[in-house]
């Protein structure tokens, strides 16, 4: 089956997507960037319709986590270190696990499931 419009592909490979997502999530968390600016930054770099929510969901997933974990110890690119990128993963995981007003998870990743379980009362 052929579609009327070609499916747009992300311009960045997984590691670059993960690092950009981590950077944006950290910037928003530190109130250095708002949600609208985050969306613009992501769309310009990726060439597809990404938002802050997309970045949170991607960053809490297996591909992004594996990409960042694969960085060597001591890795740094500008202000972003491997440790800070991992902080971005945790922020994204917590946001996806507990951020929806209804209490529903916003991602089905293993990290999100684990963080939801940790937050349940015994």
Image: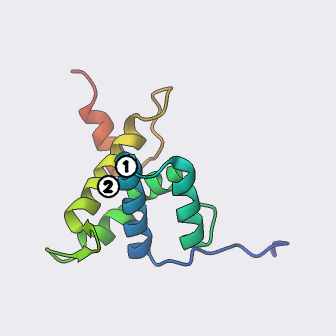
Residue bearing mark 1? 92
Q: Residue drawn at (85%, 72%), measured in percent from left and top?
A: 4
Seen in the image, is 58 located left or right of residue 39?
A: left
Colouring of the image: rainbow
Q: Is residue 122 above or below residue 1?
A: above
Question: Is any atom of residue 57 visible in this view?
Answer: yes
| Image quarter (top left, top right, bottom left or bottom right) of the N terminus | bottom right
Q: Is residue 6 above or below residue 49?
A: below
Residue bearing mark 2? 88
Seen in the image, is 71 located left or right of residue 3?
A: left
Question: Is any atom of residue 60 visible in this view?
Answer: no
Residue 6 figure quarter: bottom right
Asked if the residue at tag 1 contacts the one at tag 2, i.e. Cβ–Cβ closer than 8 Å, the answer is: yes
Task: Check disc 2 and report its element: helix, strand or loop.
Answer: helix
Q: Position of residue 15 (x, y in %)?
A: 38, 74
Q: Residue drawn at (54%, 72%), measured in percent from left and top?
A: 45
Q: Residue drawn at (22%, 67%), measured in percent from left and top?
A: 82
Between residue 74 and residue 72, name the one nearer to us.
74
Q: Position of residue 105 (x, y in %)?
A: 45, 38
């Amino acid at each position: 089956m052929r579609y009327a419009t070609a499916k747009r592909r992300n311009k960045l490979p997984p590691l670059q997507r993960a690092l950009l997502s981590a950077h944006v999530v950290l910037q928003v968390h530190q109130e250095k960037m708002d949600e609208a600016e985050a969306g613009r930054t992501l769309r310009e770099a990726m060439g597809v319709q990404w938002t802050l929510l997309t970045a949170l969901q991607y960053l809490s997933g297996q591909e992004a986590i594996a990409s960042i974990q694969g960085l060597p110890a001591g890795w740094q690119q500008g202000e972003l270190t491997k440790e800070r990128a991992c902080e971005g993963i945790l922020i994204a995981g917590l946001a996806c696990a507990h951020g929806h007003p209804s209490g529903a998870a916003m991602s089905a990743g293993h990290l999100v499931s684990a963080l939801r379980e940790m937050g349940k009362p015994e």
